[in-house]
């Protein structure tokens, strides 16, 4: 495998997180706890929405999809990070690296598209409450989810195929805890202009269009509330849109913080912390944002578990 400058890299080394050795175990426990919380929290949401018939509405069907996407998104990076923290040689095979990159992009995009579908759902619920059930039909919901899957498959596949064209020579150390597309591009010894152009154009489309659509939905929601301002209307809007708005801000806040703020000397530390934010913290918080602030979810939790207990005693 070691020719002169045509050597083919069969695996990459993931440097992981810039953590001092004495804090290693502390962070290991922290990440393991966060990952388990993410898995259990999101799984519980999916189960609750499935089991409780009060939650069989478009909004909760999207939320269940979002939880599924969160669960998968953090499973793309976290198990490998935890495994690497315990191993002497934190290696990942070439194919594994591209696979991780594919699924990372896939679930990140899916999350962004689902947030748009949820914003549209809230817009219809508040601006056309009487036509809500006829507009948000199961057919439209299924269509929106299917469209998200198709677009995200196309986008992730495009980047992965473009990455697979590149060759990698000597350097195989990725200064990150997962196979990040930008870090891989820096390692490549081929011409990466096409890749960079596609990232720039598609990244703009994939981030900006959802952001604009969500903003338009909320602008309409706000203007429809302001037309007939009433304490009750405002409270209703807040209780149904608050959670979604919080999740959207968390998602776009980190993405915008990462790409728009100038990075100084400690750019690797900053990038890693930001990546930690959106791969671990956001997927972990989403279920809590939705369930703790939400009376329907709490009610469902009570109903599902009490029913279980009753049937257990009978
Ligand atoms: C996602 O949404 C679709 C359409 O509303 C629904 O049929 C499906 O069950 C949802 N998937 C999950 C995992 O909740």
Image (tube, rainbow, N blue to C red):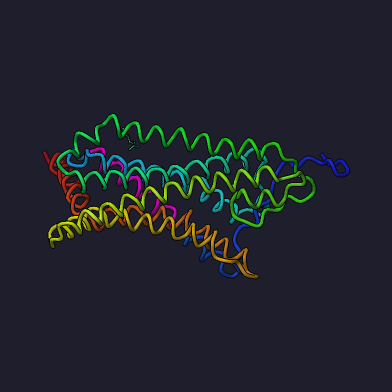
- Residue 8 location, quadrant: top right
User: In the displayed structure, would residue 216 be above or below residue 261?
Assistant: above
Between 291 and 250, the residue placed more toward the observer is 250
Q: Check if residue 286 falls in the magenta segment.
A: no
Quadrant in the picture for residue 141: top left
Residue 300 percent across, percent down from the top left = 19, 47
Q: Residue furthest top?
A: 139
Horizontally, residue 199 falls left or right of residue 132, namely right
The structure residue drawn at horizontal position 21% and vertical position 56%, both measured from the top left corner, is: 239
Measuring 53% from the left and 60% from the top, which residue is drawn there?
Answer: 258
Q: Main secondary structure of the magenta part?
A: helix
Question: Ligand 1 sits in which quadrant?
Answer: top left
Q: Where is residue 95 shown, x and y percent of the image?
A: 65, 37
* Foreground pick, 85 / 264: 264
Q: Which residues are magenta?
A: 34-51
Q: Which residue is rendered at x = 59% and y = 56% of the image?
A: 85
The residue located at (71%, 53%) in the rendering is 173
Quadrant housing the N terminus = top right
Quadrant of the snapshot with the C terminus: top left
Image-based side of 263 in relation to 4, left or right: left
């Amino acid at each position: 495998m070691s020719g002169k400058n045509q050597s083919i890299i069969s695996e990459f080394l993931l440097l992981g997180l810039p953590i001092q050795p004495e804090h290693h175990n502390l962070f290991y426990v922290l990440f393991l706890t966060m990952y388990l919380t993410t898995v259990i929290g999101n799984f519980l949401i999916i189960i609750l929405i499935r089991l409780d018939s009060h939650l069989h509405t478009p909004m909760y069907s999207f939320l269940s999809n979002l939880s599924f996407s969160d669960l998968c998104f953090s499973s793309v990076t976290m198990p490998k990070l935890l495994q690497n923290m315990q191993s002497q040689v934190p290696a990942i095979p070439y194919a594994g690296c591209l696979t991780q990159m594919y699924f990372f992009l896939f679930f990140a995009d899916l999350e962004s598209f689902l947030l748009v579908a949820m914003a549209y759902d809230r817009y219809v619920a508040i601006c056309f409450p009487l036509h809500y059930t006829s507009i948000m039909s199961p057919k439209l919901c299924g269509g929106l989810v299917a469209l998200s899957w198709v677009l995200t498959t196309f986008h992730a596949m495009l980047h992965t195929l473009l990455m697979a064209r590149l060759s990698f020579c000597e350097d195989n150390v990725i200064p990150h805890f997962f196979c990040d597309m930008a870090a891989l591009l820096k390692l490549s010894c081929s011409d990466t202009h096409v890749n960079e152009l596609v990232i720039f154009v598609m990244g703009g489309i994939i981030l900006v269009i959802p952001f604009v659509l969500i903003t338009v939905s909320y602008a309409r929601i706000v203007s429809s509330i302001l037309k007939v301002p009433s304490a009750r209307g405002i409270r209703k809007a807040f209780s149904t849109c608050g959670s979604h708005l919080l999740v959207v801000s968390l998602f776009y806040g980190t993405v915008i913080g990462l790409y728009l703020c100038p990075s100084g000397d400690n750019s690797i530390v900053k990038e890693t912390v930001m990546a930690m934010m959106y791969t671990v913290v956001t997927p972990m918080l989403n279920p809590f944002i939705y369930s703790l602030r939400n009376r329907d979810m709490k009610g469902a939790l009570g109903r599902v578990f009490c029913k279980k207990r009753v049937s257990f005693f009978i």
